[in-house]
Amino acid sequence: MRPADSIRQRNQQLILQAASEEFAARGFDATQTRDIAARAGLPKANLYYYFQSKDNLYARVLLRFVEPLLEASAKLRESDDPRVGLQAYIEARIRITREHPLTSKVFSHELLLGAKQLPEQCRDLLRIEVQRNVECLRSWIERGLLAPADPEHLMLFIWSATRTYTNLGWQIAQITGTQTPQEADYRAVAATLTQMVLRGVVGQPAVGKKLARFTT
């Protein structure tokens, strides 16, 4: 790698990290580019040189979180055994929350505000991926590998449960007695959620039985 490319990559990473911290703390509207530049230790001109605008920078921060989400979704479909797929998917989503706490907060905050600033690229990637995941769940249900359930709401339950450590940090702190979740906490929540989901939809699959909506 040429020295110029190395400097460019380093500066971009510094800006993206600083932007993640500022957006996580203040939200999109309240964040100023001068604060991002100051946190990164770079001139504000560098921010515009590499990313052109605050909107573009915000989009890059969100995309940094969408990419691991897509990788986690792929794990759901890697095995034709729903017990293996669901466990891998839940563990992967919990791991994302642990490994990407800042971008996870930014993404959650964006969704809570109606995803108004979510770039179209991110929308398209997530839309396609969720359709694949729901169809995977639907196939398992129709084949009797999972108990009758609504695949859309099953997916929503897993999403909401695996995002709790990001969205409800204060409440989690009151329950666990620790301000910052530790690795053991993440392992425990992954195991608990996996147990809940598997017992609910894998425990007693009913072959040949479908919800009314699946037969229409």
Image (cartoon, rainbow, N blue to C red):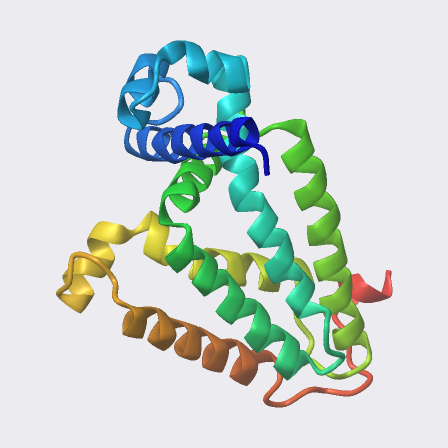
Query: Which image quarter holds the N terminus?
Result: top right
* Count of numbered marks: 0
Q: Residue at x 68, y 87 (%)?
A: 205
In the figure, 171 relative to 116: above or below? below
The x, y position of residue 182, in whole percent, is: 25, 66
Q: Please tell me in which quadrant of the rendered image residue 14 appears.
A: top left
Vertical position of residue 40 compared to residue 174: above or below: above
Q: Quadrant of the C terminus?
A: bottom right
Residue located at (69% from left, 52% from top): 130
One can see residue 150 in this view: no
Q: Residue at x 50, y 24 (%)?
A: 57
**Relative height, residue 190 to residue 156 (above, below):** below
Q: Nearer the viewer, residue 62 or 200?
A: 62
Residue at the right extreme of this rendering: 216
Residue 62 drawn at (x, y percent): 52, 36
x and y percent of residue 144 in the render?
Answer: 77, 83
Q: Is any part of residue 62 visible from this angle?
A: yes
Estimate the x, y position of residue 159 in percent, counting from the top left.
52, 57
The correct choice, above or below, for 187 with respect to 29 in the image is: below
Farthest residue toward the bottom? 204
Left/right placement of residue 63 relative to residue 175 reads right
Between 35 and 195, the residue placed more toward the observer is 35
